[in-house]
Image (cartoon, grey):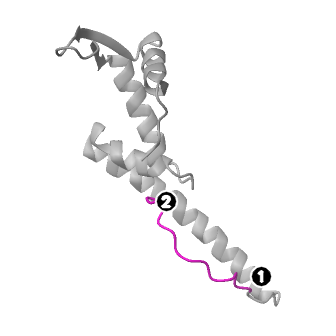
Amino acid sequence: MVKVRPGTLYHAVGRLEADGLLEATGTDRDGRRPERTTYRTTDEGNAALAQRLAGMLSDAVNEYPVFPHAIAGAHNLPSDVVLELLDTRLGALEEQLAFLARDHEAAFAKGVERRRPPAQPKRNPWNK
């Protein structure tokens, strides 16, 4: 989850509307409650969403909370596209792992001793 300050969401929706990614479809009022505006994504907004999700799903970056958000939004893309993007991400992670393994082997060959950091309690990134 991402904490959102009051007003931030309205500002973001306003920017998305100004950029042509959202459009208002109507306003209504329920009793004495404030008016509510209903929005829909435009074709341009859907394309921008698909492009952003594609990058978030395929790029192997260690940046919380980008990947969990991408997984949460993956239902907005066709499943075959999601699988292809995740395969791309997996390939990049395998390349990173191979690079680290080569460095590990080179250090070991030079006689560098393995040093372990002090044990740290495991932390669940979903709980703050």
Task: Give neighbour class at mark 2: few <14, some 14-19, many 20+ (Cα, 10 Å).
Answer: some
Q: What residue type is labelled 1?
A: Ala
Q: What stretch is highlighted in magenta?
A: 115-128
Q: In this view, does 75 lie above or below 104?
A: above
Q: Quick check: 65 left or right of 45?
A: right
Q: In this view, does 79 lie above or below 125?
A: above
Task: Give neighbour class at mark 1: few <14, some 14-19, many 20+ (Cα, 10 Å).
Answer: few
Which of disc 1 and disc 2 is earlier in sequence? 2
Cα distance between the residues tagged 2 and 1? 24 Å
- The image quadrant of residue 105 is bottom right
Residue 10 located within the stretch drawn in magenta: no
Q: Which of 61 and 31 is in front in this view?
A: 31
Residue 121 located within the stretch drawn in magenta: yes
The label shown at residue 91 is 2
The residue depicted at 53 percent of the width and 57 percent of the height is 92
Q: Main secondary structure of the magenta part?
A: loop
SS category of the residue bearing label 1 = helix
Q: Are marks 2 and 1 in contact (CB under 8 Å)?
A: no
- The image quadrant of residue 49 is top left
**What residue is shown with label 1?**
107
